[in-house]
Amino acid sequence: MGYLFFAIGIVATIIFLTKRTASVTIDVVAIKSIASMGFILSGLFFFINNEVCPDYLGVFTVGGACFGMLGDIVLDLKYSKLNDADRCTNLGFWTFLIGHIFYSIAMVSVYGIEIINVICVAIGIVAGIVIAVATEKVMKLEYGKFKKITILYTAVLCMTLGFAGGYTITECYTLHSVLLNIGFALFVLSDAFLAGLYFSIKPENRTNRKAIVLNHATYFAAQYIIALSLAFYRG
């Protein structure tokens, strides 16, 4: 069942990417919802069907995916709730942030914390703060009232990547840890595209179709790869 939902979700994602533009329609949201349910349900069944997958790893990984879907829904609401656009953006930040904390808990619950993990996480947090601050000028962005939450979110995102990177090393590059590392790296790339769409000082960049497609393509790739990792955990 896991691979069935995985395949259905991938097809839905491809259809969604061909239809997604700067405007958000009900039809597009419906297809996007199917794509999102694809990575949640595939991850759930990969967990259920993998007898050696620990409960905490499965529950918190699927939980992180659920928060990702919720965050995505909240961010899309800003296009229909223009008066609450700032509120939707802020809530979207927090929802995704909680999702990354869930992913981090999933990894820690299974792999524990060793010195290499602490080093990688510390590097990730510092790198996240530096990236958030530096890219505002480099990419010609303007965070405005969202500067604090942007820096916090980027730090947590890179912390999660730091956990994955550390475990990839300590677990001797098992397929599960490598897939997690790839997934979270794609999350970072996805959010880099999203930053331009949300905070670029050039209005035309906020509706750039290529950036919109790349943002969603890397986001869904990240979610599906992380879901798939549950099928390859071997203890």
Image (cartoon, grey):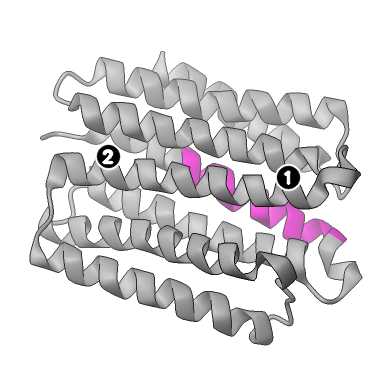
The image shows residue 129 at horizontal and vertical percentages of 46, 75
**Marks 1/2: CA–CA distance:** 27 Å
Asked whether residue 163 appears in the rendered view, the answer is yes
Q: Main secondary structure of the magenta part?
A: helix
In reply to whether residue 216 is colored magenta, the answer given is: yes
The x, y position of residue 50, in whole percent, is 22, 21
Residue receiving disc 2 = 106
Amino acid type, callout 1: Cys
Q: Is residue 23 visible?
A: no
Tell me if label 1 and label 2 are in contact, CB under 8 Å: no
For label 1, the residue is 88
**Tag 2: amino acid:** Ala
Report helix, strand or loop for mark 2. helix
Whether 183 is drawn above or below 59: the answer is below
Q: State which region is magenta.
A: 207-223
Mark 1 secondary-structure assignment: helix
The 10 Å Cα crowd at callout 2, few under 14, some 14 to 19, many 20 or more, is many
Q: Is residue 224 magenta?
A: no
Is residue 23 left or right of 219 when viewed as pictured?
Answer: right
